[in-house]
Image (cartoon, helix red, strand yellow):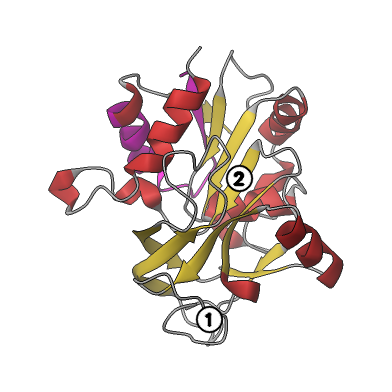
Amino acid sequence: MKAGIVVFPGTNRERDMAQALRLTSGRPPQMLWHRDTSLPALDLVVLPGGFSFGDYLRSGAMAAHSPIMREIKAFAARGGHVLGVCNGFQILTEAQLLPGALLRNAGMRFLAQDCFLKVENEATVFTSGWRKGAVFRSPMAHGDGNYTVSAEGLARLEGEGRVAFRYCAVDGAVSADDRTLNPNGSINAIAGVLSENGRVCGLMPHPENLVDPDLGATDGVPMFRSLVESLVA
């Protein structure tokens, strides 16, 4: 699998993502600078976490207008796969590659803690390593992770199976109103969504930070194995 990771000023999770991709694919990804005006031949483009452009204006708003985003939109339109994690998810919504927006967390506090995620759709290149209903642990670290979308957009996401992940309890129980289960207050406890064609995925927590036993767990490995097994020619 040929993967590229986009680096913006303020990105700080690119090395974590590179390590996750290298460990699962055996191949180091390429680093892509936000001012690049072309993409090499790739199977996957990843927008990692951090604070692109210092989160000025809105998280991800300035990065969404970087030159490389025109190429990523064209890449996605040609059938390429794109993953956005945390700030990357925010950028994808600002660039309108995914619906909705990420608002300030409920309680207006930055959250740096573990959470549990429930897999809602197993039939994607991002999630095929799990079965629907599987629960896994993932770190989260964000101040603007409160996902929202219009009523019409929410109905489409739910009706079309485009909710990829939901915040939950360790036993899989979901409650959008319970802040112990849905810490940032996201609508319908949504933690990750998919584009209409299923080729673009964004989520707020960081599965790339749990891919090595030396880090204490390997809960995030199925996502990266899913990508490798689906995208290797």
Please state if 160 lies on the left or on the right of 185 as rendered. right
Q: Position of residue 28 (x, y in %)?
A: 35, 22
Q: Which mark is residue 201?
A: 2
Residue 31 visible? The answer is: no
In front: 74, or 79? 79
Mark 2 or 1, nearer chain start: 1
In front: 143, or 182? 182
The quarter holding residue 151 reads bottom right
Residue at the image point whose x is 74% and y is 47% from the top: 95
Residue 15 lies, with reference to residue 2, above or below; the image says below
Is residue 118 located in the magenta-colored stretch of the structure?
Answer: no
Q: Position of residue 139 (x, y in %)?
A: 35, 61
Please state if 199 lies on the left or on the right of 226 as rendered. right
Local secondary structure at mark 2: strand
What is the crowding at mark 2: few (fewer than 14 residues within 10 Å), some, or many (at least 20)?
Answer: many
Q: Position of residue 10 (x, y in %)?
A: 49, 50
Task: Please give the range of residues in magenta.
Answer: 1-23
Residue 24 visible? The answer is: yes
Residue 117 lies, with reference to residue 164, above or below; the image says below
In front: 175, or 30? 175
Q: Which residue is mark 1?
A: 175
Q: Position of residue 213 (x, y in %)?
A: 16, 45
Local secondary structure at mark 1: loop
